[in-house]
Image (tube, grey):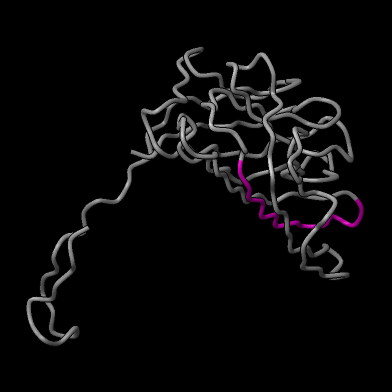
Amino acid sequence: MSIVKLNNNGVKNATAFGSITGLGNLILIKTQTASSSASISFVDGTSSVVLDNTYKEYIFYFNNIHPATSGADFVFNMSVDTGSNYNVTKTTTYFRAAHSEGDQNPDFGYVTGRDLAQSTSDQILGSTLMNDADAGVSGSLHLFDPSSSVFVKHFNSRVNIMETGAGISNDNVIAGYANTTSAVDAVIFKMSSGNCDTGTISLYGVN
């Protein structure tokens, strides 16, 4: 990245700036729309999905994923065999900030029951979702260098959900790694129970 230089000594008098280069561009690969869907999966080489060494970083964007079942969790997992099994071993962390519509019980902290320690289980991204007509999940998940045959596969996610009960807004931050040096070539998203009624998930590559 080039250094930004002023054309004179004072910022207030500057009339021109140097350019900034080297910033990544987002390349839309695939958008999928939920319609009473049991799951939404992105498998490399199928349905125009690219999930290989084309990009070093991939981003999934969730836009108002609505659960059919109240109290369900929005979860994800990964595969190293193009979706035959979604059971990659993961170690993760999970913390959240929460605040209710009634201005009660604000909370911030680590949530031990939603992390994983060398587990093949699905990772929770949003827990105990409300399924009211105006509820849903929105946010993103970043997956880094999934096709590497040398390193584990790091990921991080941040989502906002509407939790059951008193209409609680949860800002969830999740991070971890898939503890495998095999290429991750498929990712699946689903509810722990019931379907994903509506919403979209878009996959981008960072160029």
Q: Place residue 121 in its image quadrant.
A: top right
Q: Hey, which residue is sitting farthest left in the picture?
A: 7
Magenta includes 149? no
Q: How many marks on residues?
A: 0
Residue 13 shown left or right of residue 23 in the figure: left
Q: Position of residue 100 (x, y in %)?
A: 83, 63
**Is 39 placed above or below 131 here?**
above
**Residue at image coords 88%, 70%:** 104
Residue 79 shown left or right of residue 116 in the figure: left
**Residue at image coords 13%, 76%:** 6
- Pick the residue in front: 194 or 101: 194
**Is 8 placed above or below 179 here?**
below
Q: Hey, which residue is sitting farthest right in the picture?
A: 165
Q: Position of residue 130 (x, y in %)?
A: 84, 44
- Pick the residue in front: 36 or 170: 170
For the stretch drawn in magenta, the main secondary structure is strand
Assign the C terminus to one quadrant of the image.
top left
Q: Position of residue 110 (x, y in %)?
A: 77, 62
Magenta includes 174? yes
**Residue at image coords 7%, 76%:** 7
Q: Place residue 109 in its image quadrant.
A: bottom right
Assign the N terminus to one quadrant of the image.
bottom left
**From which residue to which does the magenta span run?**
165-177
